[in-house]
Amino acid sequence: MLELDGINLIYNRGRVDEVVALRGLSLTVHTGQFVTVIGSNGAGKSSVVRTVSGAARPTSGRVRIGGRDVTGWPDYRRAGLVARVFDDPRAGSAPELSIEDNLALAMSRGRRRTLRFALSAKRRARMRERLARLGLGLENRLADRVELLSAGQRQSLTMVMAGLSAPEVLLLDEHLAALDPATAAKVLALTEELVRDMGCTTLMITHNMDHALAMGERLLVLSRGTVIADLDAATKEATSPSGLVDLISGAGDAVSDRLLLGDRTEVGR
């Protein structure tokens, strides 16, 4: 379970350029729940991700994961609890290392390190099994450097890495944003499969209204650092993109062209 209790996050506090990113945000996401998050530019989506991952420490309020208060934990200490997939496919892996080295690092993430080989026949078999699900042939390229992969291949690999780390919370930070529509559709299908298999608490940040409505079982709409709408599965199913536009504009936020157009990636409802 993920709990955010009265989170305030202020960047550059006390300075002329002070920015209030989150305002008294409280949120509970139960274990295994898949939640999508949408909002206009500056709504606080990325700040929620940074707060949960430990990249940003809230000015006030508490963060709990699985009942543990992790408010003061930096991101490296939360590594065994939280996995994050970034919007940039290059950000989630080490390009100069091989595919198998990246996967081995993911398997060891957040665990106590010991003097043993990171790669074994058993681990490689597990890697091949996970990669084979992608249908990209990466299971036959374990020794290839990650920098040789396409953006879609790298983001798919990053998703597999997130699954291998067995996190309690998975953060998908606009992970389709840099992909072309065809590749995004494949990664989106992979997202559904991995989230289902992992069974962890998932927050998926997106600018695409179709994705926000079709994916997951709950939808949060953010505006100016707080939640203005929390839609359950039934309400989400009955809501249209124009309904989301009305919610966002009704809060006084400008709806960007990116939100209105999305990337038109095909997704089932």
Image (cartoon, helix red, strand yellow):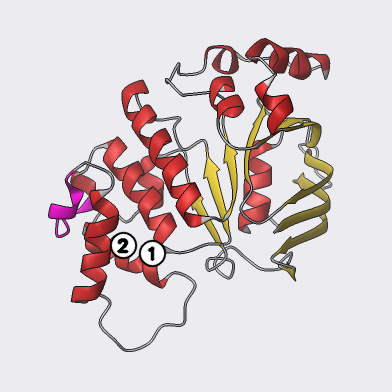
Mark 2: which amino acid? Leu
Is 75 within the magenta?
no
Give the residue at x 35% y 67%.
105
Q: What numbered label is drawn on residue 14?
A: none
Q: Secondary structure at mark 1?
A: helix
In-front residue for pair 224/160? 160
Secondary structure, mark 2, is helix
Q: How many labels, in total? A: 2
Query: Magenta segment, principal secondary structure?
Result: loop
Left or right position of 142 against 165: left
Circle 1 Cα neighbour tier, 10 Å, few/some/many (<14 / 14–19 / ≥20): many
* Residue assigned mark 2: 103
Q: Residue at x 21, y 66 (%)?
A: 125
Out of 220 and 198, give the one closest to the viewer.
198
Q: Quadrant of residue 187?
A: top left
Q: Is residue 269 above or below residue 16?
A: above
Q: Horizontal and vertical percent for residue 71?
A: 74, 64
What separation in Å lies between label 1 and label 2 (alpha carbons)? 5 Å
CB within 8 Å, label 1 to label 2: yes
Q: Quadrant of residue 221?
A: top right
The residue segment tinted magenta is 137-146
Magenta-drawn stretch contains 145: yes
Is residue 60 at least partly visible in the picture?
A: yes
Label 2 crowd (10 A; few <14 / some 14-19 / many >=20): many
Q: Is residue 134 left or right of residue 244?
A: left
Marking on residue 106: 1
Along the line of sight, which residue is nearer the eye, 218 or 16? Answer: 218
